[in-house]
């Protein structure tokens, strides 16, 4: 069996394609179950965010697994394979660890070092574990990647400054509002991780903001966030109040998964102020033509690239340090895997030889017992010594080639030759 990762990301696919390929989180379980129903897929983790839709799996046949994963993604996203096949990023065996550790470190994010990706990966593997589709191989891989990601952020300055989509979005919003931020009402749509980050960044970035309204479909969840934030500027509203709230709001920041836009030209009818609409959702939650309305400025994820590129320029040294940490942690993980793989086959081989010796001693027990005690012990010692010498060479070869193609071939040969 081998490791593979297959997916779409912002480095290889357009924002439009990523938007159409996003699978809402409540549908992930169905995707996971479909994946492991295929003959070549034994374990799977699935994650789909605004800039990444990806499968990590333990598989048998490479090409068979690619076909099965592609078919599953097509079914889950409603896209024809021809629409995304050329944009897929595929990693195999060692490359999977390199890729996933880099993702966890924030090195594959639009905002280098952003924190949200750690939560996304953690939720993905926890869900797969809860559904019993992530076994020990993927669980350990993700846990090691998450540990490495936290180490990168603790030991480098990669997360200094603009640290997330939330932070970058708030900075862009405040720059756009300028002096109009004083006393302004900002509506945040959503109460999940991204919306929470947006609200925290708003409150921390400017004491000038007059009011932040958390607008969410589930009011209780918004209330929980308000209590945690413990800021008198924060209030809560139901989602069906959004149109009324936008009448007086100076900005709205949408950070919630929805199947179709929440804010349209009709939603904005009757507003009393100019409006900045920040769309952080994928699929988009602010209709694209909203920016044509008088006094309305629409900003989406794509418009944040300039700020993100500046953040990257400021972190060149930190990115290099993070790369070095990731390389070190990946090599340690792979060494552990090689040692563990060698230990398993070596243990099986030794157990096989021990069982042969024990069986032969048992079969010839009456003859051995007829010998004197010292002679019988000498026979046992000579037999064990000869068997140990026979086992030494294959044992050494298995340990020395562990984790390589040759090691895989030797392991298969040993299991075939000795029927273990």
Image: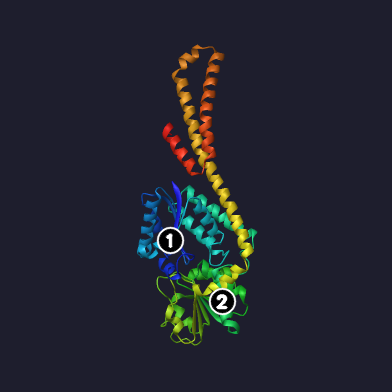
Of residue 158 and residue 227, the one placed in the foreground of this image is: 158
Q: Taking the image as drawn, is residue 254 in sight?
A: no
Q: Is residue 235 left or right of residue 6?
A: right
Give the number of callouts: 2
Q: Are marks 1 and 2 in contact (CB under 8 Å)?
A: no
410 to 232, vertically: above or below? above
> Mark 2 falls on what kind of element?
helix
Of residue 135 and residue 351, the one placed in the foreground of this image is: 351
Q: Taking the image as drawn, is residue 173 in sight?
A: yes
Name the N-terminal-most of marks 1 and 2: 1
Residue 251 x %, y %: 52, 80
Q: Quadrant of the C terminus?
A: top left
Q: Cα distance, mark 1 to mark 2?
A: 31 Å
> Mark 1 falls on what kind of element?
loop
Residue at x-position 61% and y-position 60%? 320
On residue 88, which mark appears?
1
Quadrant of residue 268 within the rendered picture: bottom left
Rendering colour mode: rainbow
On residue 268, which mark appears?
none
Residue 191 x %, y %: 50, 69
> Nearer the viewer's eye, disc 1 or disc 2?
1
Residue marked by disc 2: 172
Query: Dot 1, how many residues are within 10 Å of its Cα: few (below 14), some (14-19), or many (20+)?
Result: some
Residue at x-position 38% and y-position 64%? 77
317 to 405, vertically: above or below? below
Residue 278 x %, y %: 50, 76
Query: Dot 2, how many residues are within 10 Å of its Cα: few (below 14), some (14-19), or many (20+)?
Result: some
Residue 13 x %, y %: 45, 66
């Amino acid at each position: 069996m081998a490791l593979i990762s297959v997916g779409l990301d912002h480095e290889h696919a357009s924002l439009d394609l990523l938007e159409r390929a996003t699978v809402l989180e409540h549908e992930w379980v169905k995707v996971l179950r479909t994946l492991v129903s295929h003959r070549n897929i034994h374990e799977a983790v699935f994650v789909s965010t605004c800039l990444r839709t990806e499968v990590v799996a333990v598989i048998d046949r490479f090409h068979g697994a690619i076909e099965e994963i592609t078919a599953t993604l097509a079914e889950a996203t409603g896209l024809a394979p021809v629409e995304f096949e050329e944009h897929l990023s595929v990693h195999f065996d060692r490359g999977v660890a390199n890729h996933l550790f880099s993702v966890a470190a924030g090195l594959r994010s639009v905002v280098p070092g952003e924190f949200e990706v750690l939560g996304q990966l953690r939720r993905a593997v926890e869900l797969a574990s809860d559904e019993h589709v992530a076994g020990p191989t993927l669980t350990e891989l993700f846990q090691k990647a998450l540990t490495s990601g936290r180490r990168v952020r603790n030991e480098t300055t990669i997360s200094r400054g603009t640290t997330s989509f939330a932070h970058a979005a708030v900075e862009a919003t405040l720059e756009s509002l300028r002096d109009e931020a004083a006393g302004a009402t900002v509506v945040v749509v959503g109460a999940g991780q991204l919306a929470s980050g947006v609200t925290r960044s708003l409150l921390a970035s400017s004491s000038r903001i007059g009011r932040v309204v958390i607008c969410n479909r589930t009011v209780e969840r918004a209330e929980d966030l308000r209590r945690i934030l413990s800021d008198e500027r924060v209030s809560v509203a139901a989602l069906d109040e959004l149109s009324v709230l936008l009448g007086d709001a100076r900005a709205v920041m949408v950070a919630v998964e929805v199947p179709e836009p929440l804010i349209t030209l009709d939603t904005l009818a009757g507003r009393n102020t100019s409006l900045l609409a920040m769309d952080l959702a994928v699929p988009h939650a602010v209709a694209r033509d909203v920016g044509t309305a008088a006094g309305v400025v629409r900003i989406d994820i794509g418009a944040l690239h300039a700020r993100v590129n500046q953040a990257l320029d400021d972190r060149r040294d930190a990115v290099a340090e993070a790369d070095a940490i990731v390389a070190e942690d990946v090599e340690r993980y792979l060494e552990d895997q090689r040692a563990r793989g060698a230990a398993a086959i070596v243990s099986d081989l030794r157990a096989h030889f021990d069982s042969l010796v024990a069986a032969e001693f048992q079969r010839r027990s009456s003859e051995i017992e007829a010998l004197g005690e010292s002679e019988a012990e000498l026979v046992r010692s000579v037999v064990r010594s000869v068997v140990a010498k026979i086992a030494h060479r294959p044992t050494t070869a298995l340990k020395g080639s562990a984790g390589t193609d040759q090691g895989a071939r030797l392991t298969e040969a040993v299991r075939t030759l000795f029927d273990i």
